[in-house]
Each structure stands twice: as C-alpha cells, then as structure tokens.
Image (spheres, rainbow, N blue to C red):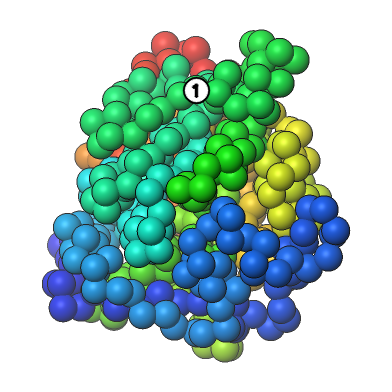
Amino acid sequence: MEQTKIILDENEMPKQWYNVLTDLPTPLDPPLDPRTKEPLSPATLEPIFAKALIRQEMSDERYIDIPEEILDIYRLWRPSPLYRAHRLEKLLKTPAKIYYKYEGVSPAGSHKTNTSTAQAYYNMKEGTERITTETGAGQWGSALSLACNYFGLECKVYMVRSSFYQKPYRKSMMTVWGANVVPSPSPETEFGRKILEEQPDTPGSLGIAISEAVEDAVAHDNTKYSLGSVLNHVMLHQTIIGAECKRQLEKVEDYPDIIIGCCGGGSNLAGISFEFIKDRIAGKNNVRVIAVEPSSCPTLTKGEYRYDFGDSAEMTPLLKMYTLGHQHVPPAIHAGGLRYHGDSPIISKLCADGFIEAVSYDQNPVFDAAVQFARTEAIIPAPESAHAIRCAIDEALKCKQTGEEKTILFNLSGHGHFDMSSYDMYFNKELA
C-alpha cells in the first residue's frame, strides 16, 4: 500500500505566513467606519486590536515572518500530519485519491490555535493584560484560552448560548486554561441585557457574542478584543496549513485537483487553500476550491455580497462580504462554529471572482459522512469538519461514476471529542 501518513520534521515547518492580498487580481474593498461609512483608518481599530495585528490586517507584504516565540509553541503540534485516506477510498471504490490535513492534533483540538497563539503573543508584546472574545462551538474559545495561558493574559469568552449548553466540556476546557466563560447573550453587557429582555429564549448567535466581547473590550483600558475567523490577519495566520500541505504532497509527487474546507467565517478554508489559489492566480493550475456550509446558515450559497456589520449591535467596521444580515440568528445546529451570518472578505471576494465555489448540506447527511469516515479512518471529526468530509465523499463518488483519477484534499480542521452529544442525537434520530 502507498504511504498513508505524510509527515514533515520540525526543520521543514514553514517560517512565514502567506498574505494572499498581494496576489488578488483586483484589490479588496476596504472596511468602512461604522459612523462615517468612509474607508477605515488603522488608528480607528487601535482601541480594539493590537497594533501589530492591525498592520497585518492591511499589510502589503507577500510573506510575513513568524516570530520565533510563536514557532516555539507551534512546534508542540506542528507540522501537523497529512493522511491518505486509503480505507475510505476502498470503501467508496473510487479511483480518486483522498488526502486530509489533520489539525485536531493541536492541544485545543483544532486549527484555531494557529491564530490564537499569534494574537495572544502580539497582544502580550504590546502590554495588553486581558483579551475578550466570542466563540461558537467552543473551538476558538478553547484555542484562545490556551494561548492566553501561555502568555499570561486574562481571557473572557462569550460563548454562544446554544453551544454553551450543548457542549459543556468545551466550557470546562476553557476554564482549565484559566478563562472566564459565560453564555451569550449575557447579563454582563448592555447589549446582552437588551437581547435577553427582548428575546429571553434566544439560542444566541456569533453576531450577538461578538457585540458583547467588543463592548467589554472597549470599556476596559487594559483589554483588547480577539477574533477567531473572518479578518485578514486571521486568514494570514492559518496559511501555515496549506504551506505544509504543499511540502507534504511534494514528498509523494502529488498535487490537488480539488481542495475542500468547511466554511463559517472561512479561516480553515483559507488556511488550506490560499497557497494553492496563489498558484491558480499565477496560471499554474486550475484547482477547484469548495467551501462547504450548513444549509441552515448558507452565507456563500444564498447570502448577498455587500457591506454589512460583523456584529449584531453595529459596533464593528462594515465589511464587504457575503451575508445573511447581521441580525440573522441561525437555528441551533450542532456545527456551532459555522453559525455566522457573514464570511471573510477575502473568501467572499475569491468566491465572487470565481476562485472558490460553495455548496451546503443539512445536518443528517453530514453526520452520515462523519460516521463513515470515523469507521474507516478512525478519527471522530468535529461536526464542522464533517461538512468537508461530506463534500469530499461526494466528489470521490463523482470520480467513481466518471472514472477520473482526481486528487482530493480536505482540511480535517478538528476532532469531535467534545461533540459526542451531537453524535448521540444523530444515532437517536433526533437531529433536525
């Protein structure tokens, strides 16, 4: 049998992040000031973000060096393994080759640690003492709690209410690493109290949780806000995933025809795809990149491409993105990390320009694929990551019908060890 696990040693780990903004055929539409609706100046963001992250958000450098202090922490789990899914291929009887990059090996169990480590580091260097954030399913909150613990920062997490109760051990994990976690909307902020008064039974949303975290950050001089997806600097930090993939595939003399990632805000899709999209922009390939969404929150497949707020309280800058509207509250599905009303401006632009395509699925076929994958490849995937698996299986089955020997690469962005109640509901046929 051909090689199953493709690994790099520490010396082969990339030492730079890739900034796709420098290679876009046309410039990204600028963020707008929520008050004036004019292009945002970097200084406007300084009460919320570390200055180094603001510079990365608007950088015109193609590659940005990763500081050694960040690389030291990355080395705890990076380079992450790339696997060839031989058993899944055999089950499907497909001529396609299926590879998956497994980011669940990080201490927090997902790709989110790639950016949380960087964001906590830059905040620490600038004297920040406390960071606030939101989290959907808990992967991002876990990752930021871990990173803040590394760098001696306090961490306050506003966790979307539905996930707070669906996934109690995510909250426990954040607490172990020292974070203060509350369900959002919460009585701790003015906006949270307003939502609770108007909608006492709301499941919450990422838009609401973002509003609470930003309000909290602005109210305290020693505090900054941190976001786990959507923004340019977050996409930047995740590109180490694709850079590693390239080197790993070179070892087996392969290159993807199709790249797949689940998509809520877009960070894991960006991480695995931007290095290959760079080659497509340069005319070196014709790779298909597929974003996979839940049909209950289909921003790329059914949203409008326009300026919108990133949060429900209209405190954040206006971003040009695919959106369902910043007041949208999706159903309380189990892929809580994909319940965001908008998308990364970069992902949105690449989708609008034809470099990324999008599909959506209901919960049950996604869990069908997750179980099929777990029974062949042994890893139990997060519900979010299982969306990518569903699409990869469907693409492999198309190859079976056509006889095409395509190479499919997807990002297994995290494990599902804290999502077993979701699997219980699936087996009990209780998923909507």
Which residue: 85% across, 59% down?
37
Residue 153 visible in rendering: yes
Q: Quadrant of the C terminus?
A: top right
- In the image, is residue 425 above or below residue 26? above
- In the image, is residue 411 above or below residue 43? above
Which residue: 29% across, 78% down?
15
Q: Amino acid at mark 1?
A: Pro
* Nearer the observer, 87 or 53: 53
- In the image, is residue 300 above or below residue 63? above
Residue 339 visible in rendering: no
- In the image, is residue 200 above or below residue 337? above
Quadrant position of residue 218: top right
* Nearer the observer, 31 or 220: 220
* Nearer the observer, 384 or 66: 66
Which residue: 32% across, 47% down?
153
Residue 66 in picture, x, y percent from top left: 33, 74
* Nearer the observer, 375 or 148: 148
Q: Is residue 97 left or right of residue 278?
A: left
Residue 242 in picture, x, y percent from top left: 39, 69
Quadrant position of residue 407: bottom left
Say what secondary structure mark 1 lies in. strand
Question: Badge 1 is on which residue?
Answer: 183
Circle 1 crowding by C-alpha within 10 Å: few under 14, some 14–19, many from 20 = many
